[in-house]
Amino acid sequence: MRTRSWVGLAMAAVLPISLAVTAAPASAAAHMAAPPKVTIAVAGDQATISQATMRPGVVEFQVGKTFKVPGPQGGPDTLSIVRTDQLDEVLAALGPVFAEDFADPASMAAAARGMAAARSMSTWYGGTKKGGVWQVDLPAGNYYVIGLQSTMMGLAKPVAFTVAGEPRSAPLHATAGTIRAISVPGGNAFVAKGMSHLGDGWVKFANSAKEVHFMSMTGVKPSTDAATIRKAFQSNSDPKWIIGPHYDFDVISPGVSVAMQGPFGAGRYLVDCFIPSETDGMPHALMGMWKLVDVG
Ligand SMILES: [Cu+2]
């Protein structure tokens, strides 16, 4: 099975896009008010954000137009949210990750070190493609909206924004279903609960593990079982059991939870994460970070 770059992500055109922009509630008394809606998009080679400052608390991001990555592995880039005071150093650390050669142990070791270094200098709050909507609780700090793959290729510029001031206390959108990344002996894993009855379609993605993780959901034939997946990860054959749709959500750091807006189509999905391990650069999925989940 082809391994995807950690930004080869798509919550692909399944979510309706809204360009409505709403300011944060002005009154501190509106403590249960809905979170402010902030639109992130691109204009030319520049990422954009609809408001350059916001108060700490839950924010709802809506993704507009995104960068287009050229080349055979190209396509629409993800727009993601990262908090860091050292963006240049983070991007430098990720260099060996984007250049990783899975046939070269030295390259894999360099990618593993890059992942650990980048994690220590930054906190990632998720991201997705055009039309995607998610909510996340942002603490005070200095942030960027970044199309990571485009930026790593020197084709795009991130935009800075600031979270400061009196915190708001709006909760994350309620979710019936949760997909959680956890640490297990020897690696990482996904656990899922409540995914068979999603209600209004929002899903929580939480990172309770020690490394960063993304979450990819690929629709598979109902007959697909664990043996099918194990076999596929050990071969390069084209998996006939993939039927779609495909939803992706970009990396979140340890301790971060997001609520993703659906709807997510009913059916069986392979949930996986191909982030290189901080131990040896091996994609997490090939070390067991995958799960078959039935969505209803
Ligand atoms: Cu992972």
Image: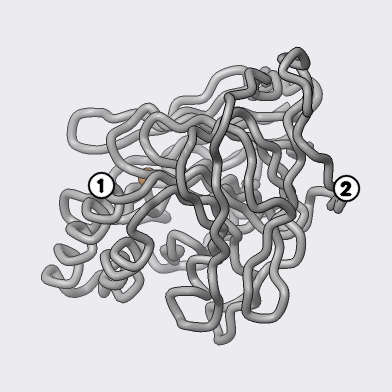
- Amino acid type of disc 2? Ala
Is 41 located above or below residue 261 in the figure? below
Q: Which of 107 and 225 is in front in this view?
A: 107
Which of the two discs, 2 and 1, labels the residue nearer the N terminus?
2
Q: In which quarter of the image is residue 210?
A: top left
Q: How crowded is mark 1: few (under 14 residues within 10 Å), some or many (20 or more)?
A: few
Q: Residues within 10 Å of mark 2 (few under 14, many from 20)?
A: few
92 left or right of 268?
A: left
Residue at numbered disc 2: 20
Q: Nearer the viewer, residue 242 or 255?
A: 255
Q: In which quarter of the image is residue 226?
A: top left
Residue at numbered disc 1: 120
Split into quadrants, the picture shows ligand 1 in the one at top left
| Residue positioned most to the bottom | 71
276 left or right of 241?
A: left
* Quarter that holds the C terminus: top right
Q: Which residue sits at x=40%, y=44%?
A: 123
State the scheme by which the image is colored. one colour
